[in-house]
Image (cartoon, rainbow, N blue to C red):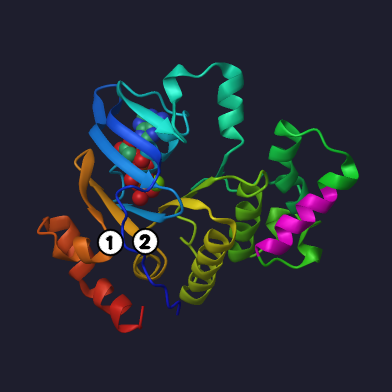
């Protein structure tokens, strides 16, 4: 288990993602109802909420993949609605994403997958592209021989690592991880958490992580935000969430699974 010391929250820290009054809906259905959220530079923010509440929708809205009906989103100090296409491209280079679904292109090898963002945004020789991809592959703890494998030849844990390597392809400031440890066994999930914490420390990343994994929330997240009824129900270090009297948060953090996570030394 990780022995992670959660740093105190400094309200003067730079906000790298600022979400204000965001409303998102599909047809008649409203998913996010005036949501506010800040993510600070260098933190790992765990984003929780019951299935279907809109965690992936918010992630995709921040990335500009889902239109919002109201509100503003600033990433790295830039209002996403005010960017020219070229400014937008420059900003996209500064974040990496591990999507919940379709982590990798199935017809491409791991190395080719990692090179997709590099080819899109950088102009580099093939030799340099290969060297950079191998560096990223090594960085996420995959062996060099994984580089030429197709996703179908990899285990679930290796796929997550390869997808993380692709998210890190452009040396981003921020990485968005949508349930990175779902489907992994507890040991595999723990190792992946440790990898994320190590990368966050060594690369100074800001990590926005959607997760259902209580171990991750206890061990790697600096702060947690809980989504429900279209808004943030509570946010802060785990201690703050543990004190919440919101019924969903209480049953999530004080239920049987939560007690098991705490007892495991997390
Ligand atoms: N493109 C879309 N069109 C219509 N409805 C959508 C679309 N994307 C998401 N939804 C709906 O928005 C709601 C929130 O979905 P979302 O995927 O964000 O949930 P989630 O919190 O990520 O859940 P899970 O924990 O299961 O991943 C769901 O009711 C979903 O059906
Ligand atoms: Mg989701």
Badge 1 marks a residue whose secondary structure is loop
**On the rendered structure, is 219 left or right of 101?**
left
Q: Which residue is denoted by mark 2 in the rendering?
A: 222
The quadrant of the image that shows the N terminus is: bottom left
Q: Main secondary structure of the magenta part?
A: helix
Label 2 near label 1: C-beta < 8 Å?
yes
- Counting labels gives 2
Would the CB of label 1 be found within 8 Å of ligand 1? no
- The residue positioned 71% from the left and 56% from the top of the image is 136
The quadrant of the image that shows the C terminus is: bottom left
Q: Residues within 10 Å of mark 1 (few under 14, many from 20)?
A: many
Q: Position of residue 40 (x, y in %)?
A: 39, 48
Would the CB of label 2 be found within 8 Å of ligand 1? no
Q: Position of residue 230 (x, y in %)?
A: 23, 38
Point out the tag, 1 or 2, that comes first from the N-terminus: 2
Q: Nearer the viewer, residue 2 or 42?
A: 42
Is 113 located above or below residue 230 in the figure?
A: below
The label number, if any, that marks residue 237 in the structure image? 1
- The residue positioned 47% from the left and 52% from the top of the image is 207
Q: Position of residue 7 (x, y in %)?
A: 36, 64
Please state the extent of the stretch shown in magenta in the rendering. Answer: 130-140
Is 236 located above or below residue 256 in the figure?
A: above
Q: Is residue 77 visible?
A: yes
Q: Is residue 98 visible?
A: no
Q: How far apart, in angstroms, are the residues tagged by discs 1 and 2? A: 6 Å
Q: Position of residue 67 (x, y in %)?
A: 40, 23
Badge 2 marks a residue whose secondary structure is loop
Q: Is residue 215 magenta?
A: no
The label number, if any, that marks residue 43 in the structure image? none
- Can you tell which quarter of the image residue 139 is in? bottom right
Is 212 located above or below residue 27 in the figure?
A: below
């Amino acid at each position: 288990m990780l022995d992670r010391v959660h740093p105190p929250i400094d309200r003067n820290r730079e906000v790298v993602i600022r979400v204000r009054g965001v409303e998102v809906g599909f047809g008649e259905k409203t998913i996010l109802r005036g949501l506010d959220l800040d993510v600070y530079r260098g933190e790992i923010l765990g984003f929780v909420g019951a299935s279907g509440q809109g965690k992936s929708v918010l992630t995709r809205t921040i990335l500009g993949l889902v239109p919002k009906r109201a509100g503003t989103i600033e990433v790295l100090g830039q209002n996403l609605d005010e960017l020219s296409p070229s400014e937008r491209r420059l900003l996209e280079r500064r974040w990496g994403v591990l999507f919940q679904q379709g982590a990798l292109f199935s017809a491409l090898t791991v190395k080719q997958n990692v090179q997709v963002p590099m080819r899109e945004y950088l102009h580099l020789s093939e030799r340099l592209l290969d060297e950079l991809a191998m560096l990223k592959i090594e960085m996420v703890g995959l062996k060099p021989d994984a580089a030429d494998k197709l996703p179908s030849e990899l285990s679930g844990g290796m796929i997550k690592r390869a997808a993380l390597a692709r998210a890190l392809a452009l040396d981003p400031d921020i990485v968005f991880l949508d349930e990175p440890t779902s489907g992994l066994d507890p040991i595999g999930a723990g190792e992946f958490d440790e990898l994320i914490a190590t990368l966050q420390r060594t690369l100074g990343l800001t990590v926005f992580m959607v997760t259902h994994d209580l171990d991750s929330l206890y061990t790697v997240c600096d702060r947690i935000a809980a989504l429900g009824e279209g808004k943030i129900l509570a946010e802060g270090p785990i201690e703050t969430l543990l004190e919440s009297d919101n019924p969903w948060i209480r049953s999530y953090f004080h239920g049987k699974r939560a007690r098991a996570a705490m007892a495991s030394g997390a």
